Amino acid sequence: MSEKLLAPSCATCGARDASVFCNLDANQLADLDQQKSGGLYKKGEVIFNEGCNSRGLFCVFDGKVKLSMMGPSGKEQIVRFAQKGDVMGYNSMLSRSPLSATATVLEDAQVCLVPARYFFELIKKEPKFSLELLELTAKNWNQASRLITDMAQKTTKERLAEMLLWLKETFGLDEEDCIDVKLSREEIANMVGTATEAVIRLLSELKKEKLIELQGKRIRLLDIHGLVVLANLID
Amino acid sequence: MSEKLLAPSCATCGARDASVFCNLDANQLADLDQQKSGGLYKKGEVIFNEGCNSRGLFCVFDGKVKLSMMGPSGKEQIVRFAQKGDVMGYNSMLSRSPLSATATVLEDAQVCLVPARYFFELIKKEPKFSLELLELTAKNWNQASRLITDMAQKTTKERLAEMLLWLKETFGLDEEDCIDVKLSREEIANMVGTATEAVIRLLSELKKEKLIELQGKRIRLLDIHGLVVLANLID
DNA sequence: GGTAAAGTATGATATTTGTCATTAAATGAG
DNA sequence: CTCATTTAATGACAAATATCATACTTTACC
């Protein structure tokens, strides 16, 4: 990680509007600016590690980050992504437990760090902030519960279709309708919870069924509705 | 549901000490007493239904409750249990979305209801309460993320062993080392995320391996450490 | 540009798990 | 108590998925 940071001040930070800091006033933002530090992380770098204590709340200014947990046999499980405006590492502080996931950079990222001490100060002093956090945490929990059900009950192919749609929601499509993030087949397998070979085979099937097109790591979505039906997201 | 309620006042409620209401002072508890209502629910009754709007926060005084979601093909997925001191239905209010799970009574339960309006008042007026809630929600999210990984990566047998241990943690063992809750094989299958037949077969295997004993719905844990190893909870 | 390394693709096979059918046992209502 | 209904157990089979082997392709790097 480099210390050089291109991020603007919190007051003018474009990532903040949609973030958990959206309700802070000018004074609070000036404070936050003083307290925060920032870092530039290259692809593949680890921002924080499962099992460690969190240094604070990490807020992504730009770039793409995956959050993954170690499975029981040492296999990675990707449980979430973070990008512009998303925060990470706070859950561990709130639940007073070690970090439950590792944050790894997928595309070069600028990430600010709000130190733990100031984070707790903010929570205590700013009810609006802690309410924002509460709402966010509740939503994350909701989403996680839904994912439990899907993981437990859906077939691998259904889950793969669902993950492609999740990636689309998270990172959007580029001008050629391709999912705007580059993941290896192995990483996709680590989202779906299956073997890499299975993902490769099932992607080929989806291609045969004209639902997607493949060009290396680029995945073009040809029939989103078809994927929605396949993923069993509607009846 | 009957309106008759045996629960004592909040101030003397034994279920409150370990609950999210543990930090309220005498005045606040008197207020809470005024606002809350209570109900007696019989086995099999539904306290609230997935998809509806939450009427408020439900706090279990006694009895046992399962929280389950509808899977994509109409199959139940049990995602959590609630008993003495546990609260339910608040996540929906926090995330401003319909209830994500259905609460069904496993053993006759007395459950208090704190109306939505007063719940939000409490959050706004009592930072200690919202902090408690934040911590609880963070823990629940943590646990859910861990479960995602387990569901995605563990074999059915590993998951079954894990669920038995989870039930032991949640409901404890009776004087004969039997898990202190009665669930059908189908309900266990709906925790594990598999077919009923698979659970029946795997329970027999665990019995052959001297890890458990079966007498109807009663499951005696003979070798907890063996189950921990099988569940892949240690390396 | 060439070479090693990593990632992708595909086939063969073994294992696990789901599904359907049937019987046995337990439970509950009258 | 007895019958009807639900739940549990077991077998047979089909389907899905993991694993191993191998070939091909792309990428990164000297």
Image (cartoon, coloured by chain):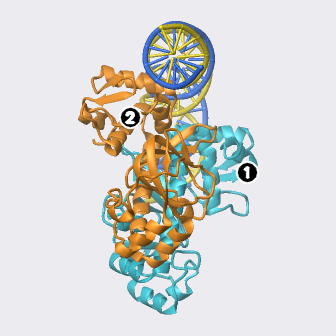
Chain colours: A orange, B cyan, C yellow, D blue
Question: Residue B12: image x %, image y %?
Answer: 56, 87
Q: Is residue A43 left or right of residue B200?
A: left
Amino acid at the residue labelled 2: Glu
Question: Quadrant location of the C terminus of chain A?
Answer: top left
Residue at the disc numbered 1:
B224
Question: Residue B138: image x %, image y %?
Answer: 51, 62
Q: Is residue A165 above or below residue A20?
A: above
Q: Is residue B207 left or right of residue B2?
A: right
**B232 or B172: which is nearer to us?**
B232
Chain letter for mark 1, please.
B
Question: Residue B206: image x %, image y %?
Answer: 68, 41
| Mark 1 Cα-neighbour bin, 10 Å: few <14, some 14–19, many ≥20 | some
Q: Is residue B28 left or right of residue A96?
A: left
Q: Is residue A59 above or below residue B20?
A: above
Chain letter for mark 2, please.
A
**A83 or A145: which is nearer to us?**
A83
Amino acid at the residue labelled 1: Ile
Residue B86 appears in view: no
Foreground mark, 2 or 1? 2
Residue B63 appears in view: yes
Residue at the disc numbered 2:
A158
Local SS, label 1:
helix
Local SS, label 2:
helix
Taking the spot 63% from the left edge, 52% from the top edge, the residue there is A51
- Tell if the residue under mark 2 belongs to the same chain as the one under mark 1: no
Q: Quadrant of residue B38?
A: bottom left
Taking the spot 32% from the left edge, 44% from the top edge, the residue there is A169
Question: Residue B59: image x %, image y %?
Answer: 47, 73
Q: Quadrant of residue B102?
A: bottom left
